[in-house]
Image (cartoon, rainbow, N blue to C red):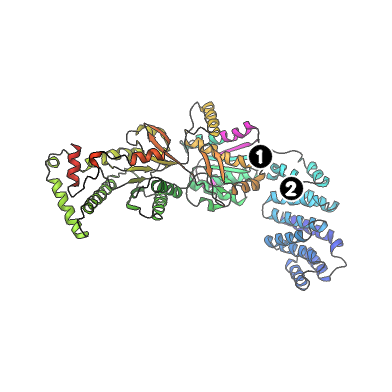
């Protein structure tokens, strides 16, 4: 294959040499002869010496082209491309420019970028290069359109501006636009009983949405993989190289889909990864897009809302010792650190494996909260203390509580008394662990706002089963199933028709992933390169999940919903209502009521 490429390129240069080289400097004629003998280093040396002596001479463009050909022969495609582009910059038309486009096509083909190679050959034909060059370009195009380039026919037809180029394309059977193709790779339903089927149905709904509107017609190719990054990467390779997809939706285990994303990036095909929220995932390549805010950003959003909108000051964090937990807690605490007057009283971790329990962590949070309450009561009575004095006063205070009749006969214990010094608890959890946390809220009696991550909303049915424990809790989420926008309505209709049910989180994720890719095509971005360009410059987009926004030159979404649970229903958070809940008007008898060292005893009496 490489031998044929080299022979074809030498043929073009020798063919055109009568026009650009003969009767010209001997150094260039010598270089052409060396190219014919595949003496690329010698040819590069001959031409380089000529260019150093004549950088702006009459034959400088010819010298650059020969030098680019020598670099191509040595496998230095980057230098060859640079030389060809330099020729085009100085000689945009004519036979010399046609040769430059042919050189570019050869470089792109050697690097595996067949689409760009085909486009350069069309540009070569647009310049009326003569019968011999036309024959060579046609032969190379015929090789290329046997593969995925065939699916980019609309781009080739658009670039063909003269009869020569159009006639060659017609001879090759490229006479009409081809249907753009998107690919979806998910785990098999047997391997993933929760997400695989609804995600794929969501992708189908997203493609159907555009086909129904008529703005663009798309074909969806589907592949399910049982397990492993190897299977996912092979599926991506087949869809890209043999079926010519313009974009991929990848859903499944993070390690599997990353392998498929790397394969896609090597071919320049954009990827949307619904449900993969690991920070930095877009570093795989410029074509990877996360349409949901990552875990770190989610923690930031929760902290920003608590401080900037609700003016809360003191926090406790309880998070799983997983990557998600570390990132979410890190985003939350980092955002608080950037705001003056806020404090994280404690950051507690737990391991979610096996028979996990969080009793110890909640007890520690309560103990720290009581100590803060007691310290505040001392300050309110202007009682001076240092660390040693505080411990003495604290122990005396606990002893006084234990001596009460109510405590001795078991009428009250410490959990009967609410902790007031903690304004909010931030509780990011792993999916399917609501039942571990929700009952603890009532048992440990925190008088604090509770803020959770999107895993609380991953299964709305589970959240509803524990509604009595999560009333007025706020959770962040990339999606809101109660949205009433046209995209969500279309998704609901599709799912109802296909399954007889209602959309869940994974339906929405699949729909929006397909919607993001299809929107770029509907906006006129053609081929993988065009879709990628549209994604890179995307700032906001209307999705079934609601409007999503992106920062300049960033491909990870920034926005999330703030949702609250009220009377067993999940609805968008209302900051005005939340402020009323957090800061009600004080009752007259409680105004300016002093707080002293008998804090816990007074709380006991007020509860009787």
Determine which of the numbered discs, if any, sits on residue 245 in the image.
Answer: none
In depth, the one of 534 and 83 nearer the eye is: 534
The furthest residue to the front: 588
Q: Is residue 544 left or right of residue 241?
A: left
Q: Quadrant of the N terminus?
A: bottom right
Residue 37 visible to an observer of this rendering? no
Residue 168 visible to an observer of this rendering? yes
- In front: mark 2 or mark 1? 1
At x 54% / y 26%, what residue is drawn? Answer: 497
In depth, the one of 197 and 400 nearer the eye is: 400
Q: Position of residue 354 (x, y in %)?
A: 33, 44
Determine which of the numbered discs, if any, sits on residue 180 in the image.
Answer: 1
Magenta residues span 204-230
Q: CA distance from mark 2 to mark 1?
A: 21 Å
Looking at the image, is 127 positioned above or below residue 603? Answer: below
Q: Is residue 263 left or right of residue 367?
A: right
Residue 89 covered by magenta stretch: no
Q: Based on the displayed image, in which of its 4 quarters is residue 215 positioned? A: top right
Q: Which residue is mark 2?
A: 143
Q: Quadrant of the C terminus?
A: top left
At x 74% / y 45%, what residue is drawn? Answer: 156
Q: Based on the displayed image, in which of its 4 quarters is residue 89 positioned? A: bottom right
Q: Based on the displayed image, in which of its 4 quarters is residue 169 positioned? A: top right
Residue 226 covered by magenta stretch: yes
Label 1: element kind: loop
Few, some or many residues within 10 Å of mark 1 (<14, 14–19, 20+): many
Q: Position of residue 133 (x, y in %)?
A: 82, 53
Label 2: element kind: helix
At x 75% / y 62%, what residue is drawn? Answer: 69
Question: Mark 2 or mark 1, which has the lower sequence index?
Answer: 2
Looking at the image, is 381 positioned above or below residue 460? Answer: below
At x 19% / y 49%, what residue is drawn? Answer: 596
């Amino acid at each position: 294959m490489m031998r044929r490429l080299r022979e074809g390129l030498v043929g073009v240069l020798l063919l055109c040499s009568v026009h650009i080289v003969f009767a010209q400097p001997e150094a260039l004629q010598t270089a052409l002869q060396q190219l014919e003998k595949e003496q690329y280093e010698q040819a590069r040396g001959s031409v380089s010496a000529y260019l150093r002596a004549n950088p702006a001479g009459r034959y400088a463009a010819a010298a650059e082209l020969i030098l680019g050909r020598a670099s191509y022969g040595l496998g230095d495609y980057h230098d060859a491309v640079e030389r060809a582009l330099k020729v085009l910059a100085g000689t945009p038309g004519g036979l010399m420019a046609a040769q430059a486009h042919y050189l570019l096509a050869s470089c792109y083909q050697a690097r595996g970028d067949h689409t760009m190679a085909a486009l350069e050959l069309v540009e070569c034909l647009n310049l009326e290069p003569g019968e011999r060059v036309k024959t060579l370009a046609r032969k190379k195009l015929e090789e290329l359109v046997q593969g995925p380039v065939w699916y980019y026919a609309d781009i080739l037809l658009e670039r063909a501006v003269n009869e020569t180029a159009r006639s060659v394309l017609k001879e090759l059977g490229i006479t009409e636009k081809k249907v753009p193709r998107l690919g979806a790779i998910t785990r098999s339903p047997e391997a993933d009983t929760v997400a695989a089927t609804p995600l794929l149905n969501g992708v189908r709904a997203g493609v159907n949405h555009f086909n129904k509107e008529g703005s663009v017609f798309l074909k969806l190719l589907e592949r399910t993989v049982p397990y492993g990054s190897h299977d996912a990467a092979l599926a991506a390779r087949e869809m890209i190289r043999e079926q010519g997809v313009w974009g991929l939706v990848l859903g499944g285990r993070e390690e599997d889909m990353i392998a498929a994303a790397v394969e896609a990036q090597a071919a320049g095909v954009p990827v949307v990864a619904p449900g993969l929220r690991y920070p930095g995932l877009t570093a795989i390549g410029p074509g990877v897009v996360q349409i949901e805010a990552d875990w770190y950003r989610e923690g930031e959003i929760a902290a920003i809302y608590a401080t900037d909108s609700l003016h809360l000051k003191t926090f406790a964090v309880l998070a799983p010792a997983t990557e998600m937990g570390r990132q979410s807690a890190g985003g939350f605490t980092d955002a608080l650190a950037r705001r003056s007057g806020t404090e994280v009283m404690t950051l507690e971790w737990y391991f979610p494996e096996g028979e996990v329990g969080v009793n110890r962590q909640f007890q520690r949070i309560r103990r720290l909260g009581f100590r803060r309450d007691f310290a505040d009561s001392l300050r309110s009575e202007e009682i001076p203390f240092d660390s040693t004095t505080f411990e003495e006063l604290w122990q005396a205070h606990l002893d006084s509580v234990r001596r009460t009749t109510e405590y001795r006969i078991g009428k009250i214990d410490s959990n009967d008394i609410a902790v007031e010094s903690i304004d909010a608890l931030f509780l990011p959890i792993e999916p399917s662990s609501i039942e571990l946390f929700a009952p603890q809220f009532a048992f440990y009696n925190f008088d604090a706002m509770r803020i959770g991550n999107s895993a609380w909303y991953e299964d709305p049915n589970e959240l509803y089963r524990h509604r009595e424990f999560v009333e007025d809790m706020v959770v962040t989420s990339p999606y809101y199933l109660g949205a009433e926008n046209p995209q969500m309505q279309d998704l609901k209709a599709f799912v109802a028709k296909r399954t007889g049910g209602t959309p869940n989180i994974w339906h929405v994720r699949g729909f929006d992933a397909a919607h993001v890719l299809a929107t770029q095509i509907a906006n006129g971005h053609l081929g993988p390169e065009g879709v990628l360009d549209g994604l890179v410059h995307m700032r906001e987009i209307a999705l079934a999940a609601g409007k999503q926004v992106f920062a300049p030159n960033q491909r990870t979404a920034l926005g999330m919903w703030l949702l609250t649970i009220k009377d067993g229903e999940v609805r968008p958070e209302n900051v005005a209502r939340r402020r009323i809940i957090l800061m009600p008007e004080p009752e007259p008898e409680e105004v300016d009521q002093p707080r002293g060292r008998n804090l816990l005893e007074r709380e006991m009496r007020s509860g009787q």
